[in-house]
Amino acid sequence: MMSMRMGAAPSRPRVHVTGGSGFIGRAVAARLAGEGYEVSASDLHGSEEVAALDLRERAGVIAHIADLAPDIVVHAGAISGTMLAIDDPALMFDVNVAGTLNLVEAMRRAGVPRLVFLSSNAVYAPAPSRAPVSESAALGPSDAYGASKLAAEAVLRCYGESHAISTLALRVSSVFGPGRVTPYLISQTLDALGRRAPLTVTDERSNMRQFIHIDDAVEAVCRAVETEHPGFTPINITGGTYLSEEAIVRILAAGMPDADITVIADRGCDDDGRVGPLDITRAQALLGYVPSIDIAAALADLARAAGAGTSAPDPHAQDTR
Ligand SMILES: NC(=O)c1ccc[n+]([C@@H]2O[C@H](COP(=O)([O-])OP(=O)(O)OC[C@H]3O[C@@H](n4cnc5c(N)ncnc54)[C@H](O)[C@@H]3O)[C@@H](O)[C@H]2O)c1
């Protein structure tokens, strides 16, 4: 089990991170440990530093949290996207809803008062316009992933109102950057470019994507760990630019002028295009969070690291800061 004690001051809280072997949980645990927190981590896939723990096993989760007695939990363990359980919605709900219930019930029994939950912009209803989406926008996910996040939020709202466990639920947009292993537009594009395979992308009329770099996502989570706020509070978290799928692919392919790219108006999937850019006013007010990573530059860096491209100016970016 990872338990990093890096000269922690006595007043620094003990933080437990679920999903500690995953893209976000691992980065959050490392950052908090580097800042002097006493950090423990768990995951379905354990390691020398991460305790093996299945969130679906209520008795095990209760025993684990009772044993650690952390001051705060960062809940990043989940089936982290529709694509990971496309034919198994029950798995999605078992892990993301029942797993969250088991965790917060374990916290209630152990007297752990605070949770930072990795929710998602997938909780919002498809929007007819691209107007900015605040936390009070209509909810209504269209897939099992979004439904599981919304159901988990409902559980946490109940524990916030009736059982004194306060939750900051970060409704995060798609996270990109080094270390992400789950498949998504960026890795699939780089993979196709590497294979010299043809690419079909949608244009800006039909599909805008809101990414956030892993460093900004970690910054937001760490600011939430620092922030005490009673009850259940959803907070939108996204990066600074709102890009079309076409613009993203063209940045990734900028170093490959012979790349075979076909642009179409629609390919029948909704991706992030169904929800307008997240309004992060609340994140700025409550957490002091503002995105700092230039998404186009970071995409170009990823392409260079993959040997697929070089930096290019982005003509389609809209500043959403
Ligand atoms: N990556 C994104 O774009 C993104 C965007 C918004 C929200 N989120 C949310 O952030 C959180 C972390 O996402 P990520 O990108 O690090 O995903 P990830 O898939 O890299 O990490 C999730 C971790 O959860 C673990 N896990 C799965 N089932 C488990 C179980 N039954 N018990 C315990 N652990 C289990 C996995 O082993 C994995 O290590 C998730 O809740 C995800 O829904 C991610």
Image (tube, rainbow, N blue to C red):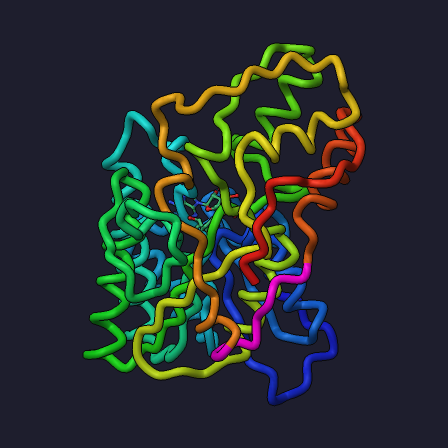
Q: Quadrant of the C terminus?
A: bottom right
Taking the spot 40% from the left edge, 76% from the top edge, the residue there is 114
* Magenta-tinted stretch: 285-292
Taking the spot 51% from the left edge, 61% from the top edge, the residue there is 17
Question: x, y (%) of residue 294?
Answer: 69, 52
Question: x, y (%) of residue 146?
Answer: 31, 46
Question: x, y (%) of residue 150?
Answer: 27, 54
**Could you tell whether 106 is left or right of 299 in the image?**
left
Q: Is residue 76 above or below residue 84?
A: below
- Residue 37 in sight: yes
Between residue 217 and residue 41, name the one nearer to us. Answer: 217
Between residue 312 and residue 65, name the one nearer to us. Answer: 312
Q: Quadrant of the N terminus?
A: bottom right
| Quarter holding residue 111 | bottom left
Query: For residue 287: magenta?
Result: yes
- Residue 50 in sight: no
| Quarter holding residue 314 | top right
**Could you tell whether 139 is left or right of 30 in the image?**
left
Query: For residue 310: magenta?
Result: no
Q: Main secondary structure of the magenta part?
A: loop
Question: x, y (%) of residue 180?
Answer: 60, 40
Residue pushed farthest bottom? 11
Q: Is residue 309 above or below residue 80?
A: above
